[in-house]
Image (tube, rainbow, N blue to C red):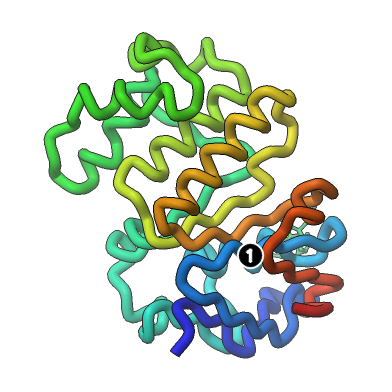
């Protein structure tokens, strides 16, 4: 039994078929790199695995159960999706790092929230920082911390490094590696030639189909 299986999945919201019969087997603790031309369907595929979109044909099976059989809040705790454009809410960094506690009905642990900031090279004082004062790279780093405050089993990354300056890229890359070393399964969409060269396992999507892998 695969840890995560994408089984004969198509996505055809109207006349145009965006994904065609995609099959993927992901083992626990795989690091899968997904690439392919713009518009080929990579984000659509990742969003289906994140249960943000539903396949129009086929199914996705996680730990032996179809996605539909999970209560959505449970699934979101197991499988975490990071957008290319990080979505932060509230006013401060603290509001974002407190969120994973609140959805679990747990009292936010301020010491823990401060302690994780240096993992992405942000000072502990950033907990009180206003979101509007953060750079794009800093926002992405806060979003990554929020999404891993309670470690998910699967981390889905949709071009999270695009548009970041070199320093932020290196920091985010190290953070992703750390999460992987902690035992997470990672599915990462990227166009970055260096990341593609370094990829452990690669899947190329062209015009809605898996080209190899
Ligand atoms: N919900 C939707 N309804 C209709 N069309 C969609 C929907 N989502 C995506 N598309 C279309 O499907 C195609 C694939 O989009 P997708 O965002 O998955 O591509 P991508 O491979 O991630 O591209 P990029 O590398 O530019 O991010 C595009 O032509 C897009 O316009
Ligand atoms: Mg995309």
Describe residue 135's horizontal placement relative to residue 3 as left or right.
Answer: right
Residue 163 horizontal/vertical position (percent): 74, 31
Describe residue 82's horizontal placement relative to residue 198 as left or right.
Answer: left
Whether 11 is drawn above or below 129: the answer is below
Describe residue 180's horizontal placement relative to residue 43 as left or right.
Answer: left
> In this view of the protein, which residue sits in the foreground, 206 or 56?
206
Residue 25 horizontal/vertical position (percent): 58, 81
- Indicate the secondary structure of the residue bearing disc 1: strand
Q: Residues within 10 Å of mark 1 (few under 14, many from 20)?
A: many
Figure disc tally: 1
> Looking at the rendering, which quadrant does residue 78 occupy?
bottom left
Whether 43 is drawn above or below 14: the answer is above
The residue that disc 1 covers is: 32
Q: Residue at x 46, y 52 (%)?
A: 181
Describe residue 27's horizontal placement relative to residue 166 as left or right.
Answer: left
> In this view of the protein, which residue sits in the foreground, 189 or 124?
124
Q: Residue at x 55, y 22 (%)?
A: 138
């Amino acid at each position: 039994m695969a840890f995560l299986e994408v089984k004969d999945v198509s996505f055809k919201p109207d006349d145009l078929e965006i994904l065609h019969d995609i099959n993927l087997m992901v083992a626990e603790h795989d690091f899968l790199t997904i690439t392919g031309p713009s518009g080929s369907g990579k984000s659509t595929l990742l969003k289906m695995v994140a249960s943000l979109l539903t396949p129009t044909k086929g199914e996705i099976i996680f730990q032996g159960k179809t996605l539909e059989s999970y209560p959505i809040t449970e699934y979101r705790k197991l499988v975490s999706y990071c957008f290319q454009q990080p979505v932060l809410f509230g006013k401060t960094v603290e509001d974002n790092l407190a969120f994973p506690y609140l959805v679990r009905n747990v009292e936010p642990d301020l010491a823990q929230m401060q302690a994780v900031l240096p993992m992405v090279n942000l000072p502990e004082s950033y907990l009180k920082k206003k979101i509007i004062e953060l750079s794009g790279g800093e926002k992405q780093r806060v979003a990554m911390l929020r999404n891993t405050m309670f470690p998910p089993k699967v981390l889905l990354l949709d071009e999270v490094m695009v548009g970041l300056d070199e320093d932020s890229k290196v920091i985010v890359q190290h953070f992703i590696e750390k999460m992987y070393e902690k035992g997470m399964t990672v599915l990462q969409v990227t166009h970055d030639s260096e990341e593609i060269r370094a990829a452990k396992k690669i899947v190329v999507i062209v015009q809605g189909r898996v080209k190899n892998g």
